[in-house]
Image (tube, helix red, strand yellow):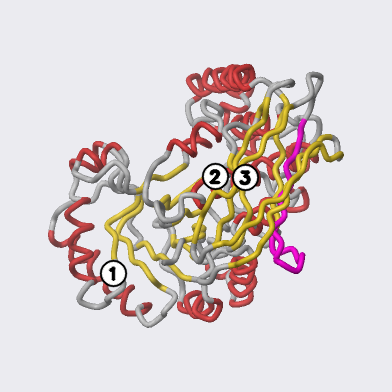
């Protein structure tokens, strides 16, 4: 078995092909390997990658899931169009089929996603693509992702096949991560969205100085969902983090990292029931304020190191129901060990600590024999918060071998606070953002409504 610790590649390093070169591919893919990603999904909005991309993945041992370049549209059923699509798909397969890294072909990206798609030729087209390319390759083929949207179910697909886990982000604060991600019950997640601003030096390369702070419309021109980023800061920190550019940027990157840790570990603990999860995206091909954990200029965000730790093949993991716990209440969680290795580990020790303001409040150890290719709960832990507790508390995990050598570790920051009160404040901010949206629509001026009314 091969659990996909995946990420959507995000397109060639630059949208402009003349700005790409072999070194960029080598550097970006080396970072993929460093991040413990074992699979890259070629997102259906981008062309299948160049031969050097697949060659480097062959050499690094990174598997590839290649979408054909069919996304979002309602496609016609006339034979001339279908013949043209089949010609392109067959040519794509022939040029890439001898790369062992490519383990999966897929027809469409979000092509069973709306009423227009239900009435279109999309299902027929995806089926005939699969039948045609099967003559040229024995690598498995899937029709599309996702297969469990409401429209996909309306045309005959099942409810628990695949979903794109993007709504935590796009809902803008309607649900916290602890509510949203565990509720998705599917075999695989081809997209899971988390976003942040790049570093300030990177921002300065494409945002005019007079629009850096306070944020100007150039942020929105470069895809920043400003209200979402602000409210996500509140979800993660209990604070909008608007004191300065430095504070805001760092907070968005930490918030992205926190979502990545919580969501990806949630699905890794379902190993055996789930086949994998793909973070959306690893890179993006334009300067933006969006998905990548490595920005357009090749600079790592804070989330990169968190992703690297979260995707460690052997990892201690903490399962908890919520991130906010009232002062005086009992914090409870489960201790898991995740192992994607094709061998087991005997005689390990899982050490844990609960910390408040840097001081150890409670600690313990659990003996563990870890099976090959497994995800298993080994123990639980609890700690009663002081009645006057404020701020945050932390849980640190360390997995050691029989000689006391640390094999991997993990760390979590949780909040002292009332979950219901925080949720109400998040929804209050969301409602204010929606008022601006209803006035201005998707125009960037929804973030700057004073500009909407200018002459």
Tell whether 348 sits left or right of 63.
right
- For the N terminus, the quadrant is bottom left
Residue beneath disc 3: 318
Residue hosting label 2: 263
The prevailing secondary structure element of the residues shown in magenta is strand
Alpha-carbon distance for marks 1 and 2?
Answer: 36 Å
Whether residue 335 can be seen here: yes
Which residue, given by chain and number where applicable, does mark 1 sit on?
88
Q: Which residues are magenta?
A: 392-408
Q: Are marks 1 and 2 in contact (CB under 8 Å)?
A: no
**Pointer 1 local density, CA inside 10 Å: few below 14, some 14–19, many at least 20:** few
Rendered image quadrant of residue 92? bottom left
Dot 3 or dot 1: first in sequence order is 1
- Residue at screen point 49% across, 80% down: 55
Question: Residue 44's image quarter?
Answer: bottom left
| Depth check, front residue: 223 or 443 | 223
Q: Quadrant of residue 333?
A: top right
């Amino acid at each position: 078995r091969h659990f996909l610790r995946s990420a959507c590649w995000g397109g060639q390093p630059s949208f402009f092909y003349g700005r790409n070169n072999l070194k960029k591919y080598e550097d970006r893919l080396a970072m993929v390997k460093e991040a413990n990603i074992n699979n890259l999904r070629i997102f259906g909005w981008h062309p299948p990658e160049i031969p050097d991309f697949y060659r480097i993945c062959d050499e690094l041992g990174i598997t590839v899931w290649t979408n054909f370049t069919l996304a979002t549209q309602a496609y016609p059923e006339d034979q001339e169009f279908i013949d043209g699509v089949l010609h392109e798909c067959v040519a794509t397969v022939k040029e890439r089929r001898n790369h062992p890294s490519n383990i999966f072909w897929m027809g469409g990206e979000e092509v069973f996603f709306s009423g227009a798609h239900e009435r279109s030729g999309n299902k027929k087209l995806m089926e005939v693509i699969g039948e045609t390319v099967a003559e040229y390759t024995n690598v498995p083929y899937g029709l599309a992702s996702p297969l469990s949207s409401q429209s996909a179910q309306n045309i005959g697909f099942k409810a628990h096949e695949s979903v794109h886990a993007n709504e935590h982000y796009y809902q803008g604060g309607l649900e916290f991560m602890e509510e949203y991600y565990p509720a998705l019950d599917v075999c695989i997640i081809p997209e899971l969205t988390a976003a942040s601003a790049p570093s300030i030096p990177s921002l300065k390369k494409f945002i005019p100085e007079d629009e850096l702070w306070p944020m100007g419309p150039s942020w929105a021109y470069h895809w920043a969902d400003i209200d979402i980023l602000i409210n996500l800061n509140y979800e993660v920190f209990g604070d909008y983090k608007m004191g300065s550019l430095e504070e805001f940027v760092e907070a968005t990157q930490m918030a992205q990292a926190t979502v990545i840790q919580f969501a990806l570990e949630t699905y890794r603990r379902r190993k055996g029931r789930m086949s994998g999860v793909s973070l959306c995206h690893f890179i993006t091909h334009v300067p933006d304020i969006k998905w990548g954990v490595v920005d357009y200029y090749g600079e790592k965000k804070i989330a990169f190191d968190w992703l690297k730790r979260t995707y460690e093949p052997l990892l201690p993991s903490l399962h908890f129901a919520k991130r906010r716990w009232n002062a005086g209440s009992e914090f409870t969680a489960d201790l898991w060990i995740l192992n994607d290795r094709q061998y087991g580990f005997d005689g390990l020790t899982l050490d844990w600590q609960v910390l408040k303001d840097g001081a150890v409040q409670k600690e313990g150890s659990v003996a563990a024999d870890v099976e090959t290719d497994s995800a298993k709960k080994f123990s639980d832990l609890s700690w009663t918060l002081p009645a006057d507790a404020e701020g945050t508390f932390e849980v640190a995990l360390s997995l050691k071998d029989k000689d006391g050598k640390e094999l991997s570790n993990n760390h979590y920051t949780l909040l002292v606070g009332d979950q219901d009160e925080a949720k109400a404040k998040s929804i209050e901010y969301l409602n204010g953002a929606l008022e601006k949206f209803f006035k201005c629509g998707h125009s960037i001026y929804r973030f700057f409504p004073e500009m909407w009314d200018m002459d």
